[in-house]
Image (cartoon, helix red, strand yellow):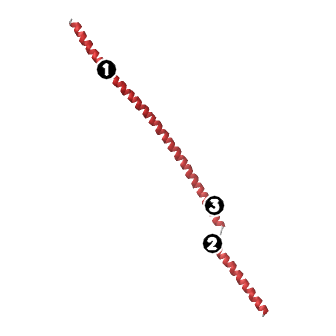
Amino acid sequence: GDSADKHAVELQRLKEEHARLMTSHGQHAKDLEGLKGLHMHHADMGERIKYLEQLLGDSAEKHAKAVQALKEAHDNHMTDLASVKAAHASLPDRMEYLEKLLGDSADKHNKEILALKAAHD
């Protein structure tokens, strides 16, 4: 009698403890699945961040090369412009040359006219 009752109480206590452990195990299993999902999402976020970093890096390199190419083209144009300016006289220089040419020509023609008048007199 007593031994059977003790075993029955102990068996009941073990069944209740087993049920409690099974509930706890079920909750831990749910938590584990949640963590797995977060881990997968985290891994996915890492991949996405890596992709964005690569994209930005590629874009930055591309823009740096484009800026360098523009700087080189600008330098070439400045060199070309300087050589064109050096090859051509400035407008004041050209005007001075024309005025001198016309002045010399006018002086020459005036002398010739005076010489002709003097020859006819």
Quarter occupied by residue 120: bottom right
Q: Is residue 50 above or below residue 79?
A: above
The alpha-carbon separation of the residues under discs 1 and 3 comes to 87 Å
Question: For mark 3, what is the residue?
Answer: 80
Assess disc 2: are there few (<14), some (14-19) or many (≥20) residues with their C-alpha within 10 Å of its C-alpha. Answer: few
In the visual, does 34 lie left or right of 51?
Answer: left
For disc 3, the neighbor class at 10 Å (few under 14, some 14 to 19, many from 20) is: few
**Numbered badge on residue 21:** 1
Q: Earlier in the sequence, mark 2 or mark 1?
A: 1
Q: Is residue 48 left or right of residue 21?
A: right
Callout 3 amino acid: Asp
Q: Secondary structure at mark 1?
A: helix
Q: Earlier in the sequence, mark 3 or mark 2?
A: 3
Q: Where in the figure is residue 70, as x and y percent of width and height?
A: 57, 54
Q: Which residue is mark 2?
A: 91
Q: Name the image quarter holding residue 110.
A: bottom right
* Figure check: 57 above or below 74: above
- What secondary structure is found at the residue carrying circle 2? helix
Q: Residue at x 26, y 15 (%)?
A: 13
Residue furthest out toward the left: 2
Q: Residue at x 55, y 47 (%)?
A: 62
> Residue 105, position in %: x, y?
71, 81
Mark-to-mark CA distance, 2 and 1: 101 Å
